[in-house]
Amino acid sequence: MINENFIQLYENSFRENWALPALTDYGEKRTFTYAEMAKQIARLHLLFEEAGIREGDRIALIGKDCIHWCVVYFATITYGAVIVPILQDFNPNDVQHIINHSGSVLLFAGDRYWESIEGKELPAIRAVFSLADFRGVYRQKGGKIQEARLDERFAAKYPNGFSADNIRYVKRDNREVVLLNYTSGTTGFSKGVMLTGNNLAGNVTYARTLDVLFKGERELCFLPLAHAYSCAFNLLVPMAFGAHVTLLGKLPSPKILLKAFADVRPHLILTVPLILEKIYKKMILPQLEKRSIKAMLHIPILNRIIYGKIRERLTNALGGNFREVIVGGAAMNQDVADFLHRIGFPFTIGYGMTECGPLISYDNHKDYVLTSCGRILKGIMEVRIDSDDPFRTAGEIQVRGENVMSGYYKNEEATRNAFTDDGWLRTGDLGTIDTEGHIYIRGRLKTMLLSSNGQNIYPEEIESKLNNLPYVLESLILEKEGRLVGLVYPDYDALCHAGLSEENLPELLEKTRLDLNKLLAPYEAVSALRLYPNEFEKTPKKSIKRYLYTNL
């Protein structure tokens, strides 16, 4: 059990960091101090009282990342209720199912999300409030919630004004569930992960030992907070430390993102592989492919100069002020990781899953071992590989420890299947481990293919190589009638710059296939590449939803 109480972490932080900036809405240029956050939380606590909310009741939340989203999150957990953040990517039917399945009694929603939900189909919901200004937009027939009275009640409760001394949050044991996080994975099956105060406190208190973010420093949040990875390290960790988070609140296109980096100049950057892969492919690779640069890279002194300039350019593009870039959420293209490591860029790749709230392994960039995803969290988590030879032969990665969930909500069968008979969580990932505890992921257990001669094939590794070849934006490797087939979404911008058209694609795809097979073992050889007309549909972590394409 983690010694520090999860809710107490924020009671202490809001008091100690009272005057410091806490959250900024980037687009609206609006900033809340920790004091303003605490006041809004206290105000929502009165609303919860008005609505008859009790400890353990569920409160659902959906909308774009913004200050009010964060206020609702903290107001819920510090009241003793359970927060149910819903990913914006879920369709209305899924949103409705999650609200009902979780038994949520209140809903806070961005206006455009509420427009797509039928209130009459949410029998347990007592009221719905807008994330824009907390006004009531729906209440159950006969409901008596009067949010208009909140200002009057707030003034009566705090006649001398609200101060740091007024912060008094619920005393709740770390073993209690504080968060229901519904997954959005590549299998299409969404489950409600029950995370306790202890699970989240494990992540937050471990982050304190890493020395990558300090009081008063800045972060830029451009990943969805409803996802466990972003929520833990773009919200829960910085708010416990007294740091200042700027919420992008919009789709992180390269143009918008690079301007935000320049404006915020963050001290720590959390990203998914796709962001760095796009920057590499669009900003760096074209320079490396110039004939003059290629020649100079073969000269030791000159290549160090060129790599230094690339590193400086990339660092400045990301704000020029960060200690480290932490990559997580999905596997990273190995060629990109190799290059970043070669030029000395300060990045590291961590590993986790929603069921661990999310962190499982991590290494500081100074200790990062290429191709690994860090070492298991010392003193908090344990790992084992389900293999006769875990150092050489890939097996399922299994973990246990402080961060591991208590189970799936209302789903005993899924919970039972998620754990081994002796209590280890099955991650569903295949990997190996070295003698120093570094974890190496090969692929997903469910996506691994078996060749005709009994060899294990990991589609993700083939896709990583394919995606790095010219004119390929993204790809998916599937098995069809015993052969490997690749679906390819082309890089149309690269085609245009090269003076090529769609008519050239069949010939280019065949050349790409031949070049790819030179990089693969014979049993991994791809028989055909097929053109796919659109980008593949992805999870919020930017992993392709593979189940949508298995029958193509």
Image: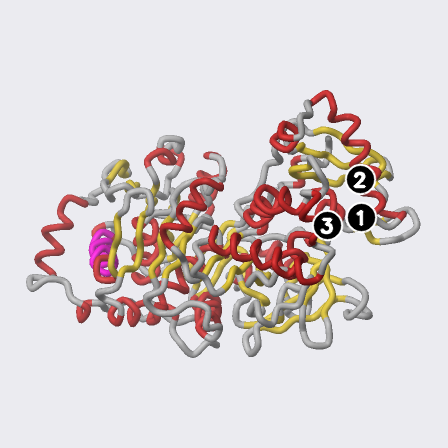
Please identify the quarter of the rendering in which residue 546 is found: top right
Q: Which residues are magenta?
A: 37-47
Q: Is residue 45 magenta?
A: yes
Residue plotted at (23% across, 68% down)? 168
Mark 1 = which residue? 449
Q: Are marks 3 and 1 in contact (CB under 8 Å)?
A: no
Give the labeled residue for mark 3. Answer: 295
Relative image position of residue 113 (x, y in whole percent): 38, 36
At numbered mark 2, what does the secondary structure look like: helix, strand or loop? strand
Between residues 158 and 123, which one lies in front from this camera angle? Answer: 158
The vertical placement of 130 against 217, above or below, is: above
Badge 3 marks a residue whose secondary structure is: helix
Is residue 536 something that shows in the picture? yes
Disc 2 target residue? 479
| Quadrant of the snapshot with the C terminus | top right
Residue 457: x, y in percent? Answer: 81, 50
Mark toward the start of the polypeptide (3 vs 1): 3
Percent across and percent down for residue 429 are 68, 57
Q: What secondary structure do most residues of the magenta stretch adopt? A: helix
Q: Amino acid at mark 3?
A: Ala
**Mark 1 vs 2: CB contact within 8 A:** yes
Q: CA distance from mark 3 to mark 1?
A: 40 Å
**Badge 1 element:** strand
CA separation, marks 1 and 2? 8 Å
**Residue at 81% across, 70% down:** 389
Q: Earlier in the sequence, mark 2 or mark 3?
A: 3
Which of 1 and 543 lies nearest the eye of the viewer? 543
**Display colour scheme:** secondary structure
Total residue callouts: 3
Q: Looking at the picture, which amino acid does disc 2 mark?
A: Glu
